[in-house]
């Protein structure tokens, strides 16, 4: 059962065995939890519900995370303790500073633009003919892997020289040529190239924002809207004072999820520019330092920095949870 | 079993059966279950006598992990077949484009394959540093002494211990051109660097953009420039200085290295010379290395410096031959008698010392295997001295083999592949890429020097 | 025990009455609104469409002319798809397809169930350490996958699980949990407390509340997260590359596709066809589950 499965039948058998085994574990947990009724058993119920999750996270994420923090204070080979030197490198080395700058661009631009586009589109197609088809179009990029999306966009930015009978094969340059311009090498000039890469991420994430926000909009109770309308609130006011406050929790969820996803993204940068031409971001730099440059210490420090960057997002979410609990 | 592996009897058996002058009139092998329809592989008729020294390995499995994927993997698998059929062992081949990072992860985590085909000495050193790589058996070392130039053994030697026989080899010092264009315009293949320059200027006078280049290659973007630089370094300063430079016994930003990069700049940063059919100087940065030589076929570019393996990038139907659509000439040395060659290659590194793994490793270090492999593949050569050029079916492989086997050739392994990873697969690529998009030569070499691990 | 009547209070969709969005839309007078929607739809579809067209063009045409020339000078071929699907000469995606399915199903089910239980505990049970535990799990979303590869693989090797599906199932479950818990917790908090209180007054325990009150309400939210996790696992390359390690026996379709372009090639023509083969399944699943999906997140933000 724990061997490598070779035939299709064996594979599916193993899969069902795994699901059954897992179901049995959950069954035992529920059985234990079921024996403790009432408020007294709350603690036991809670911990037994959490037990498998906590165990898996402890082994699979916390332990490697702590190990990474530890390693970030060591040199490239992981043998000599060098204190904060890796962090000093990140904040003084000019290459690394570019990486930080780019990461800021990504994190500031992506979540907000993706959310704004998603929200706008959700409002525009709301109740339109073929609404679900229209939504599926924008959601489609979500179903494509990051690498697939990068390939698609390489075709958009592709450059061919403006000479002889050479034809453009990139859409963006062809449009430029049609408009009478000359083709550009989009991915070379910094910082424009970083924004062009961000476009790819926005393209992927807008569908997520659109779907979630559209659902939130539809859930706003009608009586609120009715009441506002009777008060003579105009369309813009309706958006500003009724829609937006009502979907606020959904907006926070969307911004948070996209924000964290953006911090972690490295496939797009790696596939499209390989981090060249000043386009690298922390996640990509972490990958190349750890797995290509053989610099475990600096790679770990970059991972820790990524972890630190998410703290503001966590803090903001705590405030949201607190304030909604106060209501 | 393989118990006798260390006995003198075994060694002499190897030398006898697998040594010099094995021909391919291989008689039928015992097993008749093979229904392989491929006529150019040696799988159809095998003389198992020569494999008897490996003993009976029935039921054993050896896993091989490599970065070599479709379509090149087929020739590898085919070349293993005689060994599998005669010894009964099963070879499990796994090709993975992410090999270079994954092999380190697997080795560090204690899950390495039995054998890995490692394309860089630098990576080999990293693998040895994980403590999981196993020293090559004496038989392999003996074969390598016999069949390869001594340089090759050094590339796979770490701290005095030898880790694996070379597998394939490639010649990087080649310039691709169109034979018909040369004929029509009356160009001749240059034999010195000066002649190359003269030829280039002549082409410019003929209103051509002579050179095309492209260095984009995903996260490895920049490597074709490092090859250019190393080729110039090897030619302008000689192999001894080149070795010192690779080992960092002389600084990366010294006068030799700077002069070599400027020499590259003389070609690639000269707007009159580049980038034929691909744009301006900057377009070198964004053109993928795979596409960079294709303008030769369109007639928009005349010269493209790239390794022998580039042959695979020409579309199906292109005739790669001295009288075909496209071919390559040796990038000349400073003088006509200088024959420095920059090249690359792979090494078979083992992570287990089970008898079947040792036997397989030994098989791969023989000229038997090299010739079987040569017959089975396109676009593959080995630096094994006993490789028979007649087994190489395509002209570019023959050319590469001729260069590799020429006694006047001074072969040097790609320098960036031997440098520490922080330089060889990071700063060197990155800085030369910045250089081609406008960064000054001095800043470039200084930055690479700075990145060298202390 | 008293039976708790399953209450389905998913807010009804009211397609007839104008809602907030409709009112806001009026501001952007109709033709302009339609135009803007059209522009976004085109921008979001065109790049993919270009790749789709490319996947039917011959290799040489892809390399020398833009995909739009297809309409003025159509050259059509199925060669790219043949090369991708053919088991003999191409990648033979069939067995990899099976692997992808076998990998994906448990990798979605396991974190879904575990996260539902955990989210319930965080949302509706008071216990010491609740807030701090939740925050830690939330923050764990950011741990880069790559830092976990070596430690996890070492553990799998020690446990004798290396090169089996188990490593991939467990890993995906672990990596999916933090986001799943965050999303499901957010959803659960929005369920009116009165519903649960009523059940409690009737004497229902946590298990029965979970199954009889919450699960019916949760179904759409689970479908929603299920799709995200499905997309993530189906499109994953890194986890599979590291843990699958057993060659063709366990490698999913993404690994096969990544190797399609050859040792040193780019092979646009194969990549474009391969990309479409691989997105077929996620897009179909999305379209099938879209109803659930929308309702799931809709119910998730009831309160506002």
Image (cartoon, coloured by chain):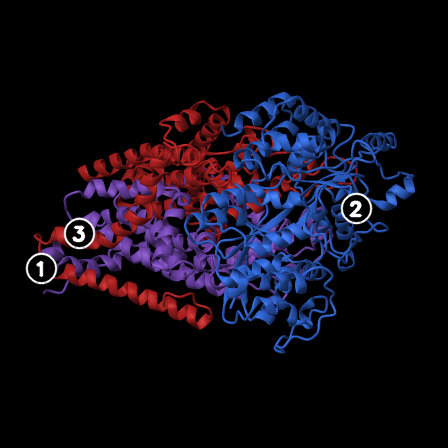
Instruction: Tell me, by letter, which chain the rendering colours red.
Output: A
Position of residue B166 in the picture relative to residue B396 (left or right)? left
Q: Are marks 1 and 3 in contact (CB under 8 Å)?
A: no
User: Is disc 3 on the same chain as disc 1?
Assistant: no
Q: Is residue A126 above or below residue B69?
A: above
Q: Position of residue B439 (x, y in %)?
A: 63, 24
**Cα gap from disc 3 to disc 2, whole angstroms:** 70 Å
Task: Chain B: give its colour.
Answer: blue
Q: Chain of mark 2?
A: B
Task: Chain C: give its colour.
Answer: purple
Is label 1 or label 3 in front? 3
Q: Is residue A73 above or below residue B317?
A: above
Q: Chain of mark 3?
A: A
Front-most of residues A70 and A273: A70
**Label 2 Cα neighbours within 10 Å, binned few <14 / some 14-19 / many ≥20:** some
Give the residue at mark 2.
B297
Q: Is residue A242 above or below residue B15?
A: above
**Label 3 Cα neighbours within 10 Å, binned few <14 / some 14-19 / many ≥20:** many
Give the residue at mark 1.
C203
Position of residue B351 in the picture relative to residue B293 (left or right)? left
Please tell me whether mark 1 sits on a helix, a strand or a loop: loop
Please tell me whether mark 3 sits on a helix, a strand or a loop: helix
Q: Which mark is residue A189?
A: none
Tell me which corner region of the image, top left, top right, bottom left or bottom right, holds residue B283: top right
Q: Position of residue C106 (x, y in %)?
A: 36, 61
Give the residue at mark 3.
A46
User: Is disc 1 on the same chain as disc 2?
Assistant: no
Front-most of residues B151 and C239: B151
């Amino acid at each position: 059962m724990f061997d490598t499965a070779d035939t299709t039948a064996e594979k599916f058998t193993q899969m069902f065995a795994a699901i059954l085994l897992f179901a049995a574990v959950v069954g035992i947990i529920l059985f234990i939890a079921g024996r403790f009724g009432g408020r007294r058993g709350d603690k036991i119920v809670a911990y037994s519900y959490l037990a498998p999750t906590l165990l898996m996270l402890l082994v699979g994420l916390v332990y490697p995370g702590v190990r990474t923090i530890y390693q970030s204070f060591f040199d490239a080979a992981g043998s000599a303790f060098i204190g904060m030197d890796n962090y000093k490198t990140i904040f003084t080395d000019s290459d690394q500073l570019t990486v930080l700058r780019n990461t800021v661009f990504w994190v500031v631009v992506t979540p907000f633009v993706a959310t704004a586009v998603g929200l706008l589109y959700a409002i525009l197609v709301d109740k339109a003919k073929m609404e679900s088809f229209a939504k599926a179009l924008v959601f489609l990029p979500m179903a494509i892997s990051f690498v697939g999306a990068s390939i698609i966009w390489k075709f958009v930015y592709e450059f061919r020289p403006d000479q002889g009978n050479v034809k453009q094969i990139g859409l963006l340059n062809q449009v430029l040529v049609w408009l009478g311009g000359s083709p550009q090498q989009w991915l070379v000039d910094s910082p424009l190239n970083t924004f062009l890469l961000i476009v790819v991420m926005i393209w992927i994430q807008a569908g997520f924002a659109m779907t979630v926000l559209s659902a939130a909009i539809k859930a706003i109770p009608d009586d609120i809207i009715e009441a506002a309308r009777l008060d003579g609130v105009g369309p813009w006011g309706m958006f500003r004072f009724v829609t937006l406050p009502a979907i606020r929790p959904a907006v926070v969820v969307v911004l948070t999820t996209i924000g964290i996803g953006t911090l972690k993204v490295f496939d797009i940068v790696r596939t499209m520019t390989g981090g060249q031409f000043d386009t690298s971001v922390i996640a990509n730099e972490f990958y190349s330092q750890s797995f290509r440059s053989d610099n475990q210490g600096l790679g770990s420090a970059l991972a820790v920095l990524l972890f630190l960057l998410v703290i503001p997002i966590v803090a903001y979410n705590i405030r949201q949870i607190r304030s909604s609990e106060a209501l | 079993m393989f118990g006798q592996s260390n006995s003198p009897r075994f060694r002499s058996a190897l030398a006898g059966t697998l040594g010099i002058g094995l021909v391919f009139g291989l008689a039928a092998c015992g097993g008749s279950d093979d229904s392989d329809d491929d006529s150019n592989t040696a799988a159809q008729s095998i003389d198992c006598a020569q494999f008897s020294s490996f003993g009976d390995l029935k039921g054993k499995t050896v896993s091989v992990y490599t970065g070599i994927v479709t379509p090149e993997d087929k020739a590898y698998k085919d070349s293993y077949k005689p060994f599998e059929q005669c010894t009964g062992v099963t070879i499990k081949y796994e090709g993975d484009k992410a090999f270079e990072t994954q092999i380190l992860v697997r080795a560090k985590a204690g899950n390495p394959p039995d054998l890995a085909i490692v394309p860089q000495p630098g990576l080999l050193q990293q693998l040895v540093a994980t403590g999981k790589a196993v020293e090559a058996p004496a038989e392999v070392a003996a074969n390598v002494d016999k069949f390869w130039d001594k340089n090759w053994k050094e590339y796979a030697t770490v701290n005095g211990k030898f880790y694996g026989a070379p597998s394939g080899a490639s010649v990087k010092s080649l310039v691709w051109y169109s034979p018909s264009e040369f004929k029509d315009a009356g160009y001749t293949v240059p034999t010195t660097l000066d002649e190359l320059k003269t030829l280039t200027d002549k082409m410019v006078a003929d209103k051509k953009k002579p050179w095309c280049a492209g260095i984009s290659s995903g996260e490895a973007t920049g490597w074709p420039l490092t090859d250019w630089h190393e080729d110039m370094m090897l030619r302008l300063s000689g192999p001894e200085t080149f070795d010192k430079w690779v080992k960092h016994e002389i600084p990366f930003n010294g006068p030799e290295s700077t002069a070599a990069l400027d020499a590259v700049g003389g070609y690639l940063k000269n707007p009159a010379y580049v980038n034929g059919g691909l744009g301006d100087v900057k377009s070198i940065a964004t053109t993928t290395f795979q596409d960079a030589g294709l303008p030769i076929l369109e007639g928009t570019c005349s010269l493209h410096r790239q390794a022998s393996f580039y042959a695979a990038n020409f579309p199906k139907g292109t005739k790669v031959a001295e009288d075909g659509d496209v071919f390559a000439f040796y990038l000349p040395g400073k003088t006509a008698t200088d024959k420095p060659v920059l090249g690359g290659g792979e090494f078979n590194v083992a992570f287990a010392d089970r008898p079947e793994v040792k036997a397989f490793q030994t098989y791969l270090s023989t000229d038997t295997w090299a010739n079987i492999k040569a017959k089975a593949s396109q676009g593959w050569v080995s630096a094994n001295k006993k490789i028979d050029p007649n087994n190489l079916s395509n002209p570019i492989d023959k050319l590469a083999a001729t260069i590799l086997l020429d006694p006047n050739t001074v072969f040097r392994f790609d320098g960036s592949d031997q440098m520490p990873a922080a330089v060889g697969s990071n700063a060197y690529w990155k800085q030369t890429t910045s250089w081609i998009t406008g960064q000054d030569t001095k800043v470039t070499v200084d930055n690479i020097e700075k990145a060298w691990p202390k | 025990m008293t039976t708790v009547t399953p209450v389905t209070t998913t807010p009804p969709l009211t397609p007839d009455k104008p809602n907030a969005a409709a009112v806001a839309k009026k501001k952007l007078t109709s033709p302009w609104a339609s135009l803007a929607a059209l522009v976004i739809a085109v921008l979001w579809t065109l790049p993919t469409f270009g790749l789709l067209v490319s996947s039917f063009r011959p290799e040489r045409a892809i390399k020398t002319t833009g995909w739009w020339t297809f309409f003025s000078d159509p050259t059509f071929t199925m060669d790219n798809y043949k090369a991708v699907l053919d088991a003999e000469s191409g990648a033979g995606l069939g067995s990899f397809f099976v692997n992808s399915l076998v990998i994906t199903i448990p990798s979605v089910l396991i974190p879904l169930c575990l996260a539902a239980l955990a989210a319930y505990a965080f949302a509706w049970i008071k216990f010491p350490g609740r807030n701090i535990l939740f925050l830690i799990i939330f923050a764990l979303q950011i741990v880069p996958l790559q830092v976990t590869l070596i430690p996890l693989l070492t553990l799998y090797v020690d446990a004798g699980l290396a090169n089996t599906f188990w490593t991939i199932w467990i890993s995906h479950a672990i990596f999916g949990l933090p986001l799943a818990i965050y999303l499901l917790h957010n959803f659960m908090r929005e369920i009116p407390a009165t519903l649960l209180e009523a059940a409690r007054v009737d004497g229902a325990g946590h298990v029965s509340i979970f199954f009889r009150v919450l699960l019916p309400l949760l179904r759409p939210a689970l479908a929603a997260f299920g799709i995200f996790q499905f997309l993530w696992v189906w499109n994953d390359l890194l986890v599979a590359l590291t843990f699958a390690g057993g060659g063709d026996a366990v490698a999913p379709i993404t690994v096969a596709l990544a190797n399609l372009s050859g040792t040193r090639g780019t092979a646009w023509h194969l990549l474009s066809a391969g990309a479409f083969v691989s997105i077929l399944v996620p897009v179909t699943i999305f379209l099938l589950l879209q109803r659930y999906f929308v309702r799931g997140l809709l119910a998730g933000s009831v309160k506002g």
